[in-house]
Image (cartoon, grey):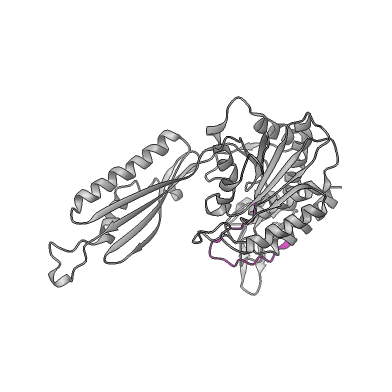
Amino acid sequence: MTDQLARQLTQRFYRYLAVSSQSDAKSTTLPSTPSQHAMAELLAQELRELGLQDIVIDQHATVTAVKPGNRPEAPRIGFITHIDTVDVGLSPDIHPQTLTFTGEDLCLNSQQDIWLRVAEHPEIAPYLGQEIVFSDGTSVLGADNKAAVTVVMTLMENLTGDHGDIVVAFVPDEEIGLRGAKALDLETRFNVDFAWTIDCCELGEVVYENFNAAAAELVFTGVPAHPMSGKGVLVNPLLMAHDFISRFDRLATPEHTEGREGYIWFNDINANASRAILKASIRDFDLKGFDAKKQQLLEVADEIAALYPTGHVALTISDIYSNISNAVGEDRRAIDLIFAALQQVGVEPKVIPMRGGTDGAALSAKGLLTPNFFTGAHNFHSRFEFLPVPSFVKSYQVAEALCYLAAK
């Protein structure tokens, strides 16, 4: 049965990977790319063929549907996954392959000489002897998050036992600020008692704590002048930006922090002689620390403005998502059921504070507690992303167990 399930999952996963659906952070539309409509249409059609009810696909490429239950007293539960893959400068087209890991380095692409070296990726070592899905090295694999889409759709096909109503939602543009989840109507489209996201994370990982996240944009306006007469007149906006960055701890950045440590990450600058636009990401698990980082940006902006009185500094801070744990109250059923499901299918739980966010962060902020559990994949947002097939099967089994446990 496990082998049959592994084949079913892998075949469906390959089918979804054949539909390119990268999101585009530069776009202001929802969805940000037309290709996500194609993915949404495919899912809607499959849901119709599977006999689900209340299937809705909207102009934003969000698909929702209901699998009616036979236990009317059971809570109404939901699963939400995103349909976009991330743009990290690799190809949007994914060419998956399944290889068996024998302990040796793996050639992902002989033509381009792309190898996954075991010494560089020791995270693959525990999967000795297992079948593992990779891309051909020219793209991400897209297990983030089409592995989760596959789990939910396969669940909708296979589930036959006693369960309550199950609502599924497939949303766009998670990778660029949870845009699809933020636009999802919880009253009419995803009206559930509690829900789960399936996203990221190796076998056993459980997330109900993630970063509070905000984005900052600073505009430094200088005073351009010809250098022959620039003394006392010229104000260089690049140096304004440089002086701003220099006032922050060089070790409080993503490459120097881990666990529950937050950071401010300066990650984009566009400048000329008149103006420099600097962008930063603000991250912290603790709301006090999160607010303190925002305050630091404001204080340093004032300091730079005073240092360059004929220039100008403008700062805008926008919240992106919040920590799921901010929404945890007395009703912990969604969290407790994950641990019960893991125990039932024989998976050791690994609770992690996620140094990122999921669609569940957006839903939790709206009042719907939505923790996350694993797909089984590793190395997201990388050409070396990989998905061990046995872990993929376990992700499905956890989702299935949740449906039956919730009904009890």
Q: Position of residue 395 (x, y in %)?
A: 72, 45
On screen, residue 211 versus residue 167, left or right, reads left
* Location of residue 222 in the rendering, given as x and y in whole percent from the top left corner: 24, 60
Bounds of the magenta span?
82-100
- Residue 70 lies in quadrant: top right
- Count of all numbered marks drawn on residues in the image: 0
Between 324 and 127, the one nearer to me in the picture: 324
Q: Can the viewer see residue 80 in this picture?
A: yes
Q: Residue at 53% of width from left, 54% of height from top?
A: 176
Front one among 231 and 39: 39
Reply above or below: 97 against 261. Answer: below
Q: Horizontally, is 4 left or right of 330 in the view?
A: right
Left or right position of 150 against 306 = right
Q: Residue at x 66, y 63 (%)?
A: 135
Foreground of the two, 19 or 344: 19
User: Which quadrant does the C terminus fall into?
Assistant: top right
- Tell me if residue 125 comes above or below residue 364 in the rendering: below
Tell me residue 245's x, y (percent): 32, 52
Residue drawn at the location 28% of the way across and 46% of the way down: 300
Splitting the image into 4 quarters, where does residue 225 fall? bottom left
Instruction: Give x and y (percent) for residue 99.
Output: 73, 61
| Relative to 51, residue 324 above or below | above
Q: Which residue in the rendered view is the most extreme toward the top?
A: 330
Is residue 101 visible in the rendered image? The answer is no
- The residue lying at 22 percent from left, 56 percent from top is 311
Whether residue 9 appears in magenta in the rendering, the answer is: no
Q: Residue furthest bottom?
A: 111
Q: Secondary structure of the magenta portion, mostly?
A: loop
Residue 83: say if magenta. Answer: yes
